[in-house]
Amino acid sequence: MSDDTQNHDGHSGSRRDFLYLSAGAFASVGGAIALWPFVDSMNPSADVLALSTVEVDVSQVEVGQRVTVKWQGKPVFIDRRTEAGIAEARDTPLDDLRDPETDEARAERPEWLVVIGVCTHLGCVPLGQTPSEPRGEWGGWFCPCHGSHYDTSGRIRKGPAPLNLPVPPLAFLNDTNIKIG
Amino acid sequence: MSSGNQQPVGDGLVKWIDTRLPVFSYLQKEYAEFQSPKNFNWFWNFGAILTFMLVMMILTGIILAMQYQPNTMLAFDSVERIMRDVNHGWMLRYMHANGATFFFIAVYIHMFRGLYYGSYKNPRELLWILGVVILVLMMATAFMGYVLPWGQMSFWGATVITNLFSAIPLIGDSIVTLLWGGFSVDNPTLNRFFALHYLFPFLIFGVVVLHVVALHVSGSNNPLGVDPKGPQDTVSFHPYYTMKDSAGLAIFITIFAFFVFFAPNFFGEPENYLPAAPLNTPAHIVPEWYFLPFFAILRSINFDVLFIEAKLGGVIAMFGAIFVLFIVPWLDKSPVRSAKFRPVYRWFFWIFVLDCFLLGWVGGRAPDNLVFEGLNLKVIHLGWLATFWYFFHFIILLPLLGIFEKPKPLPKSISAPVLGGGSAAASATAKPMEKA
């Protein structure tokens, strides 16, 4: 332990210090890498990921009707919008929006709006899926937890939520079947 | 504990064990003969009360875990089965649920005691910090425990609180997914919360041991905040404080038992007797009462601060409200411990207590509700005020008071104010008492 501090060409223990430091560095990096599987095991598992798509038959949904399906444990709102609702969403100037996004970009087929029904504030489920529930000042959805209002395109208009209701990845398999995820 | 040169205690088997493993001489030294200031008031009972509560919670918890099913399909029903079918299950569960409430009542009184009498000051800084670590662990444990019955408030409380982490820039969403083990609060979340809820009390137990070891190094503070000057200022822990602690504990347990047997759901939320429904949010999501002040601080930041969005700002403020407790020993610059001799701090202490109650009240109400119709004063406005004062008290007031406050003269010793003389006179009069 003590033989390395003054000798070796007058350098103060550089070789042993190097060994200590490099061994220590390898041990720390190795330890951190060994820890990763423990942490990563808490991430979504294969069976959870396998449930990450659902197919919905929307042939029974009337114009003006909204249905809720469960996708990845979260509610997904499917809205077969009325002409008035579509027009309202498309005519809104982007300047009026907190999270500017055109309705064209959110609803590929104007009649069908599909959004994740989780308020972007703190994760409550907004109301408005049935006619008896409040739909907020813009006729979309209203979150009762902290009073966020969404419009007929699911875009945030008023209240504490920072973002629009997100549109999940989706594909129209045919005219009556939607694949979410 | 190093007692290599110490005489073993007892005789026979006790002595045989003690020479090989000095547990008996340790107990004798640290819990029987241990010298404590003789002027403790009833607020010094809460250490013992908290120790009792921790053991009670671990015991009832282990028994409940034998009946509980940590699976989203079974959890709610298994709790109802404990309530209806398991022998004494209702009592064990109500003890555990109300135990959390009384654990927090005791810990908050214990902390306010520390703040009033300056128990965090030199040389007890680390003792205080360990206490705050215990508080943080307790909060995590209580939060995860509340999720386990898998009622509506369990589910939505877990959803809102875990969603807080999504406010962290860049990595927030990955952290939330990692916490959930999926894409929403679901079975993997419930499973891990159960595992951690079982683990954390033992971590708390470990930190409590450190807390007590640190206490036995520095010795206890006392209501006067002056150090004992000699044996005339102290009494042995046993029988004096074992008895006083037992008396206080008996009163505390009586109040606790009243709630367990006569008002078991007084502190609870009726909504949590509805099974968790992931597609249906309750109208008002409120945490348990002991989190309300912090919840109020979280919601009070409803505006952007520079580049920090409101959501992140609220999270920072909430965690900051706990973090600031860690640095209290260095924020309070006053050399005087007890508020008895700090005429200005004393007032601000009580204002701070009221502020915490106000935060709790605000946390339980919808932010946009009106407090006074005429003034257009909303709950959120009181939230702003109370949150401001919380941080103002710690960050501005405590350092300034240490500079500008003129403390009252301190007594020469613990005995002095009682006997009117110095410690020398006191020692003469105290001696016969010790023999008695």
Image (cartoon, coloured by chain):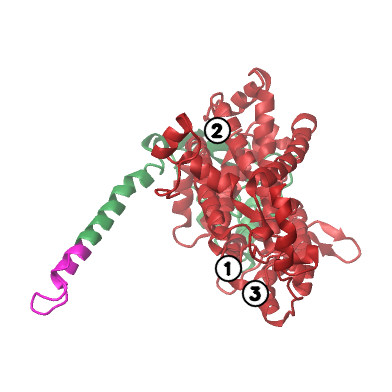
Chain colours: A green, B red
- Residue that numbered label 2 is attached to: A59
Q: Residue at x 53, y 39 (%)?
A: B197
Q: Position of residue B422 (x, y in %)?
A: 73, 70
Q: Is mark 1 on a helix, strand or loop?
A: loop
In front of the other: label 2 or label 1?
1
Q: Which residue is drawn at 70% across and 40% down?
A: B246
How many marks the image carries: the answer is 3
Answer with mark 1 or mark 3, whichever residue precedes in sequence: 1
Chain at numbered mark 2: A
Q: Where is residue B292 in the image (x, y as percent from the top left)?
A: 70, 52
Q: Which amino acid does label 3 sit on?
A: Pro
Chain at numbered mark 3: B
- Residue that numbered label 3 is attached to: B335
Q: What stretch is highlighted in magenta?
A: A1-22
Q: Residue B91 got which mark?
A: none
Quote the CA–CA distance across marks 2 and 3.
Answer: 77 Å
Q: Which of B78 and A58 is in front in this view?
A: B78
Residue B194 drawn in magenta: no
Can you see residue A146?
Answer: no
Can you see residue B149?
Answer: yes
Residue A13 drawn in magenta: yes
Discs 2 and 3 carry the same chain letter:
no
Q: Is residue B287 left or right of residue B373?
A: left
Would you place residue B121 above or below residue B369 in this image?
A: below
